[in-house]
Amino acid sequence: MIFIGNLLQASGSVFFVIPAGFITGGMTGVALVLNHFIQVPITILVAALSAGFLIFGFFALGKEFALHSLACTILYPLCFNLLSLVQAKVGLLTEDPALNALCAALCYGIGIGTIMREGAASGGLDTIAVLLNRKAGVSMSVSLDVIEILTMLPQAFYSSKQSILCGVLIAVGYSMLVDTVIARGKSMIQMEIISPKYEDINQMILSRFNRGTTLINIEGGYKRGAAFEVQTVVRPREFFAIKQAVLEKDPAAFVIVGNVSEVSGRGFTLEKKK
């Protein structure tokens, strides 16, 4: 599934975005900006950037993050290069900008959503978002949106108005589709965490991830010891980061995970209290 996700994501860039001249974000967007100024082939730039961010992630975030990112770091440039050879043979699939934008949004949305649903870290520019979250407590969703804008902005200075509009529509479209693929509508993920370090875990979820929690009195069935369970409901895009952070606090933590079909209330359908 991770391979299929990377194949779809690379297809969006190779067959629709790049031939049509649209602006785009992420790793491909950085490669397009660099290609405009230094004329190095985009395939080489994508491979070099992927390797560079993997090394950066290893030193900045540790071996475990690098291992989680390894699959996508290898698969995306590989798919990108192979599909580029195919695209060179078949040429532009359609000259209709709207159709190109629609196909690109579908490829990106389904591809990225599939990768994230499988729990793989895409590495690349996501490394910066993870670093900001761990070191400064910045929300990953906010960081990713800002990074997307910053990678698209330089392209706007030398692209046509049509390319800019289509690029923005693709970004909005695939962002909505990613949430749909991962969450399957309005579903959320409920986490029940049992650990002697419940105070640290509770505080970490509240402050670092800005998610509400509930502490529930429990009694162990074997030793009959009193304890607390930390219960929280999170968005699918946040789940893997929170789970990893919990296991960093307590590798032996007992974590129960379940899908919730819909959630309403503060922090989801209502504004969070200040």
Image (tube, helix red, strand yellow):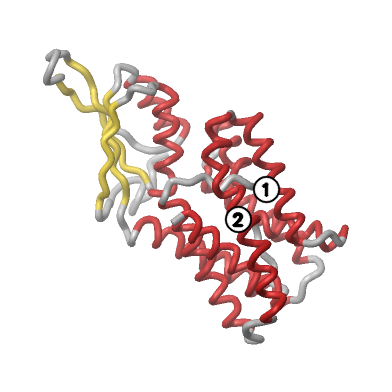
- In the rendered view, tell whether residue 198 sits above or below residue 111: above
**Most foreground residue, 85 or 217:** 85
The crowd level at tag 2 (other Cα within 10 Å; few <14, some 14-19, many 20+) is: many
- To which residue does mark 1 refer? 50
| Mark 2 residue type | Tyr
Could you say where residue 20 lies in the image, as x and y percent from the top left?
A: 69, 77
Q: Residue at x 80, y 62 (%)?
A: 41
Is 247 positioned to the left or the right of 158 in the image? left
Q: Is residue 244 above or below residue 24?
A: above
> Which quadrant, please, contains the C terminus?
top left
- Disc 2 element: helix
The residue that appears at 58% across and 65% down in the rendered structure is 171
Q: Where's the N terminus, which quadrant?
A: bottom left
Count of marks placed on residues: 2
Q: Position of residue 131 (x, y in %)?
A: 60, 35
Residue at 35%, 26% in the rendered image: 202
Return the disc, 1 or 2, that comes first in the chain's sequence.
Answer: 1
- Above or below, comparing residue 68 to residue 236 in the picture: above
Q: Which mark is residue 76?
A: 2
> Contact, CB < 8 Å: mark 1 with mark 2?
yes
The residue positioned farthest toward the right in the image shown: 38
Q: Which of the numbered marks, if any, corresponds to residue 224?
A: none
**Of residues 113 and 77, which is closer to you in this image?**
77
Q: Secondary structure at mark 1?
A: helix
